[in-house]
Image (cartoon, helix red, strand yellow):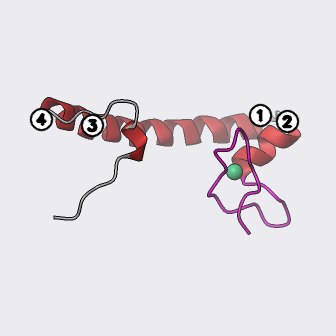
Amino acid sequence: MKCQWIGNGEGCTHEALAGHSYCAEHYAVVYQTGTVVRRKKDARRAAAVWDIESALNEAVEELIEEGYDFGEERWAVEVEEP
Ligand SMILES: [Zn+2]
C-alpha cells in the first residue's frame, strides 16, 4: 500500500509501513512521535537525500553552464529521447 500522505497536494510515492497508512517519514509527521530513534533515522535520511541533491545540483549546474535555462520548472523538466 502506498503512503496516504497528501500534504499540500504534493502527495507521497513511498510505500506505507506495514499496518499503517503512511511511510516512516509521514507517519512521524502525522503522529508527531518525536523519539530519539526517529531523529537518528531522519538525520540518516536527510544525509542520503543531501547526497542525491548534491549529485543532482552538480548535473543541473553543468547543464546551466551549457546554456540550459531551467527557470522555475527545474524539477519538472522532461528529458527528450535522442
Ligand atoms: Zn509518505
The region drawn magenta spans: 1-23
Q: Which mark is residue 32?
A: 2
Residue receiving disc 3: 60
Residue receiving disc 1: 36
Mark 1 and mark 4 lie on one chain; the one further toward the N terminus is 1
Q: Which secondary structure lies at badge 1?
A: helix
Image coords of residue 26 (percent x, y)? 74, 45
Report the magenta stretch's main SS.
loop
User: Dot 2, how many residues are within 10 Å of its Cα: few (below 14), some (14-19), or many (20+)?
Assistant: few
Disc 3 + disc 1, Cβ < 8 Å: no
Apparent side of residue 25 relative to residue 75 in the rendered image (left or right): right
Q: Which mark is residue 55?
A: none
Residue type for callout 3:
Val
Q: Which mark is residue 66?
A: 4
Residue occupying image coordinates x 73% and y 58%: 3
Closer to the camera: disc 1 or disc 4? 4
Residue occupying image coordinates x 22% and y 64%: 81
Closer to the camera: disc 3 or disc 1? 3
Q: Which secondary structure lies at badge 4?
A: loop
> Separation of disc 1 and disc 4 at Cα?
45 Å
Residue occupying image coordinates x 74% and y 40%: 38
- Quick one: which residue is furthest to the left in this view? 66
Q: Which secondary structure lies at badge 2?
A: loop
Viewer-proximal residue, 8 or 16? 8
Residue type for callout 1:
Val
> Separation of disc 3 and disc 1 at Cα?
35 Å
Disc 1 + disc 4, Cβ < 8 Å: no
Image quadrant occupied by the N terminus: bottom right
> Separation of disc 2 and disc 1 at Cα?
12 Å
Viewer-proximal residue, 5 or 72? 72
> Separation of disc 3 and disc 4 at Cα?
10 Å
Image coords of residue 51 (percent x, y)? 40, 39
